[in-house]
Image (spheres, coloured by chain):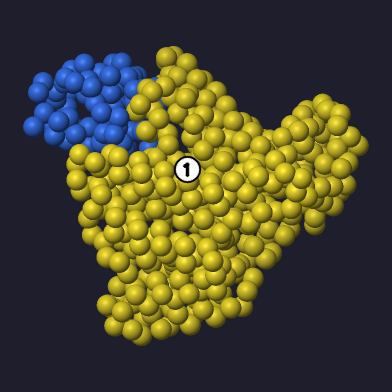
Chain colours: A yellow, B blue
Amino acid sequence: MIQSPWFWLVLFGSAVAFWLLPQRFRFPFLSATSFLYLASLEPVGVPIFMVWTVLFFFVAPEALRERRYAKLALIGLVLSILGYLCWEKYLPVLLAAMSDATPGVAIAAPLGISYFTFKLIHYAVETARGNIKNRSLPTFFTYIFLFPIFTAGPIERFDHFTSNLEHKFSGQMTAEALTRIAYGLIKIMLIAKLVSPDHVGFGIPNSAEALVSSLNDVGALKVWAFLALTYLYAYLDFSAYTDIAIGASLLFGIRIMENFRFPILAVNISDFWKRWHMTLAGWCQNYVYLPVLARTRTPYLAVYATFIAMGIWHGAAFGWLFWGLYHASGVALYMTWVRYARRYEWWRAGVRSRWKYVGIPFTFAFVTGSYAFSSTGGGAFVSIQVFLALFGIRLGG
Amino acid sequence: MNFQRNDLIGFLKGALNVDVSDVEDDTLLFSTGVIDSFSMIELITYIESTTGPSIPPGDITLENFDSIGRILSYVNSRAA
């Protein structure tokens, strides 16, 4: 989206108009602008999103008000929007896999559908919990359709959204917004390119396709190097989009949640998930991890359910499922270690805090390993081949 | 209702090995890693055994269990 001059024209033009309008017209204007801009990119999908948005806005509070049926209504709303997500994102992939469709043909789901779905589920659950009290149609529409964050997040919470609005224009806020956008652009156009595998050289495969096709000839160190660069590039690229989304939202006085906190400095895998894609991790903690934990009282099951959900949310491919299982296993092992170590005085006496930085390279390496599953095209066999190649094991095929 | 702040502090310190010297009423316990999931389950089981019936799964949220203040507020609202 940011590659298009049209995006920047709409952003700066609508920001100027937003602040020139009287306050009561600003959110109706911003929600309409966002909707029209997104509909110009996705003429079929976005109007359907509008129907869902109206349904959730009006039906959710009414259905959930009647205590006897509230639980049933909540389950109905969540399942219906998840069903729509499956229909658009997963069913076509499944049908293509079962038919003789040309392999490798990408099947595009409507723009931003995964983020859209998660925001609606958040709204329905928090409405049911009684945590959403102040709402209006223009505010809700702006929350759902705000175009700088629609396609790549962050996954904003509605309560955070409504309590972090600046109603007065200020030069300082605009300077902060433009600085954040500039950070994002510098990251995406200069720094990310420096670590991109197709720019580095040194005999490191320059793409996932090149890595896979030459897997039997590439040494384990080069596989590590390729996946580490892919991880760094993904971090810089994704966090740059987040910088631009946060800065662009601030041009309208909206302070969006942060999404990254230097994940490459994480001291363990649990810490990593408090630093990487924080809004997705937070969403999954609230709506997958804690509900599963509360019902089963089995932390390991909750961890696996959470990361499998995260993997499937990313994409309809076995590679993402394996990615989820891999991260879940890492977190489960770390939880076991902490539980064991906490019994001992040396751990409580501060060994943990003094030695924690030793964990940074291990965590980096562990996360690097996960890119064998997420960056190699999604095929089950190929992702396992690449992962084993990290340890010098060649799996024929 | 027979559940006081001191009971909770005593359980965190004695059963869960939490260093409570830095824990205030609004210190986030689960979100910041002061307690892990296993400890959270032990804590919930302890509260149930002390204060009465099982806590419904829908009530096990960060809004109710992520700090001493929130836990006491939740337990008191259950007893009311």
Image-quadrant location for residue A368 = top right
Instruction: Examine the image and state in which quarter residue A252 appears.
Output: bottom left
Residue drawn at x 55%, y 74% as measured from the top left: A40
Q: In which quarter of the image is the C terminus of chain B?
A: top left
| Quadrant, the N terminus of chain B | top left
In the figure, B49 relative to A216: above or below?
above
Q: Nearer the viewer, residue A336 or A89?
A: A89
Kind of residue at badge 1: Ala
Is residue A358 something that shows in the picture? no
Horizontally, residue B36 falls left or right of residue A185, namely left
Q: Which of A388 and A84 is in front in this view?
A: A84
Q: Please state the chain letter of the residue tagged with numbered disc 1 in the rendered image.
A: A
Q: Residue at x 72, y 44 (%)?
A: A99
Question: In the orientation shown, which residue stands out farthest toward the front?
Answer: A99
Residue at the spot 77% in from the left edge and 42% down from the top edge: A225
Q: In this view, does B12 lie to the left or right of A78?
A: left
Query: Whole-percent x and y of residue A205?
Result: 83, 47
Q: Position of residue A161 (x, y in %)?
A: 35, 59
Q: Which residue lies furthest to the right in this view?
A: A217
In front of the other: A87 or A78:
A87
- Residue depicted at x 31% and y 79%: A25
Residue that badge 1 annotates: A281
Q: Position of residue A298 (x, y in %)?
A: 42, 22
- How many neighbours does mark 1 have within 10 angstroms: few (below 14), some (14-19), or many (20 or more)? many
Give SS at disc 1.
helix
User: From the viewer's perspective, is residue A241 above or below residue A334?
Assistant: below
Relative to A309, does residue A160 appear above or below in the rendering? below
Where does the image place residue A227, in percent across and percent down from the top left? 73, 42
The answer to whether one can see residue A120 in this image is: yes
